[in-house]
Image (cartoon, coloured by chain):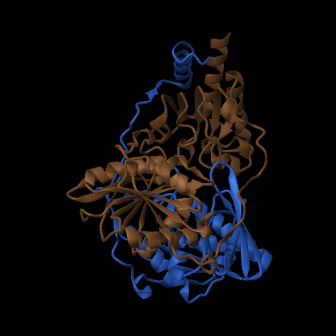
Chain colours: A brown, B blue
């Protein structure tokens, strides 16, 4: 990796608001740039983004790119790929970091392909070893970790997992803000094949899980729909709201509005009881901020025990009824 | 319409996983395998589109000999024929390498639509479909819940974060990555299983397809993650463990 090339953080924004993971990505870029001894840069993409670029320039960076174009007002995979390809050919970063969001998943692999490279996605840690960048990502839905050694030319591409770097570790600019350079890519409407419509929500949410003090959540381990009542009994004695991981809502066993995770609600109750939930990252990001986490699972190696404070390893059909009895006794 | 569905064979969900002695992958000897779950939803969507609009569904799968079982199951569910790219060392390729041989295998088929799951349950890179689209020069969209065909165009419902969705229109041919849970999965019928035995599976090798580029990002080590937080585990039979947990929740955590 050449010493003169930067680490570039791609910040995500929508309607003038930064995605919360943009700051985590920026912090990761600052830290990796420091360990490589190279400058850090950041890029904001969209239309009318001067104030966002100024906000980004208040952080420690050698430069902030404002990638401006009317056709970048709404996100499209084609528009973003063309604009960012042009930016990368000009800025020539050594490493490009993205937040691992749904949007990044949609365009960053395409962008990397244009440089004959690949995106190392959903990275949870990084280090330099003998001058090479080693990135750590999860395999088998978090049950194992894999290390990836980045080889080949530059730029190299990686996306960082939600929560893997802390937004509050982001360093502010020392003295003057970073210089902002506006970059206007050449972009033609005919090059953009996707025609996006306005985002929408399916229905008003009748259940606000974020207000619940205690949540009992059920996952795949429940086996079949008729077994849900076993867990509902526990929710009842605890005075808790019922929630579920995605597969349970997909199957229609509980309504979609009770789904916790990246595509559902993000909750942080006083206590979260995960029953038969293995703890794929898509679920963990929605509940790991809970004050106390209790996990009941048959598999001692389930990733849910990574975030749990208390656990019982065993058959939920034995453990949950025993818990119901114990709670009743404690409340009597 | 001609639809290609790219599927992957992965270890059965909840398989006990052991890191191989070389430390570069898992020990596969004692494992059973099945279709990657999001790919099963991609196949379901393809079969529904065929039922509605007519045409052909072709299963595409890269993997070792054992993948033939998963391919047969897809044919039994209603796919018309299959292409099996036989390779014993999928793990020596990176995302670009896999996508390249998959793209080359479908190029001469000139499909209207290519569907695949949004990610694999083993590697979870979530990129194969997007990279294939770029290599084939066709538009794409990801994390798709619904597909409506309207002549030479499609309109898809894409899932966004936090319960949001978006409709996106695009011309065919296109590549879509399908989200799990978008439909109810069908089972193979006895008739389907019988018919599958006579359906064509064309076998090719990566070399037949021009090979794959040397990997840019290869896995150099696989290991069990170190616990960052030590959960306090209550031992004993269910009753004993439950009583200890509740005591903790009542007197220390004070949530009961």
Asked whether B117 or B137 is in front, the reply is B137
- Is residue B54 toward the left or the right of residue B232 in the image? right
Say which residue appears at 50% left-offset and 29% top-offset: A311
Compare residues B49 and A271 and report the one nearer the observer: A271
- Percent of width and height locating residue B67: 50, 70
- Left or right side of A285 for A180: left
Q: Quadrant of the N terminus of chain B?
A: bottom right
View extreme (bottom): residue: B108
Q: The C terminus of chain B is located in which quarter?
A: top right
Place residue A285 in its image quadrant: top right
Residue A184 x/y as whole percent: 51, 70
The x and y percentages for residue B45 are: 70, 68
Q: Residue at x 73, y 71 (%)?
A: B155
Residue B15 in view here: no
- In this view, the residue farthest toward the top is A332
Q: Residue A195 location, x and y as percent?
A: 68, 71
């Amino acid at each position: 990796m050449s010493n003169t090339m930067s680490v570039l953080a791609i910040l995500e924004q929508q309607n003038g608001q930064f995605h919360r993971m943009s700051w985590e990505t920026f912090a990761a870029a600052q830290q990796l740039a420091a360990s490589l001894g190279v400058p850090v840069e950041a890029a904001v993409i969209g239309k009318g983004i001067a104030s966002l670029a100024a906000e980004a320039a208040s952080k420690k960076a050698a430069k902030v790119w404002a990638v401006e174009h009317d056709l970048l007002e709404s996100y499209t995979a084609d528009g973003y790929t063309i604009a960012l390809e042009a930016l990368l050919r000009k800025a020539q970063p050594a490493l490009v970091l993205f937040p691992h969001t749904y949007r990044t998943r949609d365009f960053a692999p395409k962008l990397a392909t244009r440089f004959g490279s690949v995106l190392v996605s959903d990275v949870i840690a990084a280090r330099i070893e003998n001058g090479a960048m080693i990135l750590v990502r999860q395999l088998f839905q978090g049950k194992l970790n894999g290390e990836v050694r980045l080889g080949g030319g530059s730029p190299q591409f990686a996306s960082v997992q939600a929560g893997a770097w802390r937004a509050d570790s982001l360093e502010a600019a020392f003295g003057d803000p970073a210089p902002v350079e506006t970059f206007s890519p050449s972009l033609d409407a005919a090059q953009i094949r996707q025609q996006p419509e306005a985002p929408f929500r399916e229905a008003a949410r009748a259940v606000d899980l974020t207000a619940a003090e205690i949540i009992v959540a059920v996952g795949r381990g429940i086996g079949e729909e008729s077994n849900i009542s076993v867990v509902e009994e526990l929710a009842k004695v605890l005075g808790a709201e019922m929630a579920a991981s995605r597969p349970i809502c997909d199957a229609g066993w509980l309504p979609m509005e009770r789904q916790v995770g990246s595509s559902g609600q993000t909750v942080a109750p006083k206590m979260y009881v995960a029953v038969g939930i293995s703890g794929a990252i898509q679920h963990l990001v929605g509940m790991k901020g809970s004050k106390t986490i209790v996990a009941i699972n048959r598999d001692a190696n389930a990733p849910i025990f990574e975030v749990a404070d208390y656990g019982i390893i065993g058959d939920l059909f034995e453990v949950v009824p025993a818990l119901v009895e114990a709670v009743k006794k404690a409340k009597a | 319409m001609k639809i290609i569905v790219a599927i992957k064979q992965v270890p059965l969900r909840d398989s006990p996983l052991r890191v191989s002695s070389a430390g570069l992958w898992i020990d596969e000897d004692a494992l059973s395998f099945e279709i990657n779950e999001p790919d099963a939803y991609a196949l379901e969507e393809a079969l529904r589109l065929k039922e509605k609009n007519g045409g052909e569904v072709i299963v595409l799968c890269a993997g070792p000999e054992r993948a033939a079982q998963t391919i047969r199951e897809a044919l039994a569910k209603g796919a018309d024929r299959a292409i099996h790219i036989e390779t014993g060392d999928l793990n020596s390729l990176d995302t670009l390498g896999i996508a390249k041989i998959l793209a080359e295998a479908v190029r001469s088929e000139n499909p209207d639509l290519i569907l695949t799951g949004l990610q694999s349950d083993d590697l979870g890179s979530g990129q194969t479909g997007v990279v294939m689209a770029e290599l084939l020069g066709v538009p794409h969209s990801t994390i798709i819940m619904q597909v409506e065909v309207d002549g030479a165009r499609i309109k898809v419902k894409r899932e966004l974060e936090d319960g949001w969705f978006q409709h996106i229109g695009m011309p065919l041919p296109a590549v879509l990555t399908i989200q799990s849970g978008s439909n109810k999965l069908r089972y193979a019928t006895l008739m389907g299983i019988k018919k599958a035995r006579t359906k064509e599976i064309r076998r090719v090798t990566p070399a037949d397809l021009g090979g794959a580029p040397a990997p840019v990002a290869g896995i150099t080590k696989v290991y069990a993650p170190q616990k960052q937080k030590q959960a306090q585990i209550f031992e004993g039979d269910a009753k004993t463990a439950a009583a200890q947990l509740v005591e903790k929740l009542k007197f220390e955590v004070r949530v009961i």
